């Protein structure tokens, strides 16, 4: 198990949901070329792993961290659309959700939580944190 498996599983779930939206919501992934759509909504997805832990003999591993999804919308349109997407993410990644991938079980450990919104040139950005844990 590794952060690579965890990232792929969480990103896959997000991508499936985003592609089912009308219109589909593009996603910018870490270290992948992306051109933001002009005056349209999109998401930014980041895996922010915490320290990997182990038992004393070094046999088991515990991975945890945050899957950060930033909701990006054109500036000046209010926060309602971002809050709607945030609610959708809460439903997509509920507490106690178990995602299985490549023999790994990934657990969502806390409710999706928003951080303070940020303004960037031309954008309103609402970060959403999805905390996870995976054991080996």
Image (tube, rainbow, N blue to C red):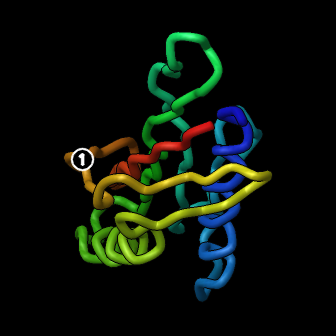
Can you see residue 125?
Answer: no
Q: How crowded is mark 1: few (under 14 residues within 10 Å), some or many (20 or more)?
A: few
Is 29 placed above or below 98 here? above
What residue appears at the point 45 percent right and 25 percent down from the top-left corner? 50
Left or right placement of residue 121 versus residue 35 in this view: left
Query: Hey, which quadrant is residue 111 in on the image?
Result: bottom left
User: Of residues 82 and 40, which is closer to you in this image?
Assistant: 82
What residue appears at the point 42 percent right and 58 percent down from the top-left corner? 71
Spot occupied by residue 112 in the image (x, y as percentages of width and height) = 32, 59
Spot occupied by residue 116 in the image (x, y as percentages of width and height) = 20, 46
In this view, the residue farthest toward the left is 116
In this view, the residue farthest toward the front is 57
Spot occupied by residue 11 in the image (x, y as percentages of width and height) = 65, 55
Is 14 placed above or below 6 here? below
What residue appears at the point 32 percent right and 75 percent down from the top-left corner? 87
| Labels in figure, total | 1
Left or right placement of residue 59 versus residue 40 in this view: right
Spot occupied by residue 117 in the image (x, y as percentages of width and height) = 24, 50
Q: In which quarter of the image is the C terminus?
A: top right
Q: Disc 1 designates what residue?
A: 115
What residue appears at the point 43 percent right and 40 percent down from the top-left corner? 66
Is 129 placed above or below 83 here? above
Q: Quadrant of the N terminus?
A: top right
Per the image, label 1 sits on a secondary structure element best described as loop
User: Of residues 13 and 83, which is closer to you in this image?
Assistant: 13
Can you see residue 21?
Answer: yes
Is 2 placed above or below 108 here? above
């Amino acid at each position: 198990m590794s952060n690579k498996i965890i990232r792929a599983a969480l990103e896959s779930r997000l991508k499936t949901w985003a592609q089912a939206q009308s219109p589909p919501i593009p996603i910018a992934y870490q270290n992948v070329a992306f051109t933001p759509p002009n005056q349209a909504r999109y998401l930014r997805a980041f895996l922010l792993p915490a320290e990997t832990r182990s038992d004393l003999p070094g046999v088991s591993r515990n991975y945890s961290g945050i899957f950060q999804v930033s909701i990006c919308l054109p500036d000046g349109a209010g926060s309602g659309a971002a809050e709607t997407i945030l609610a959708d993410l809460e439903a997509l990644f509920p507490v106690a959700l178990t995602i299985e991938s490549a023999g790994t079980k990934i657990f969502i450990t806390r409710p999706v939580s928003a951080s303070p919104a940020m303004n960037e040139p031309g954008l309103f950005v609402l970060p959403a944190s999805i905390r996870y844990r995976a054991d080996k």
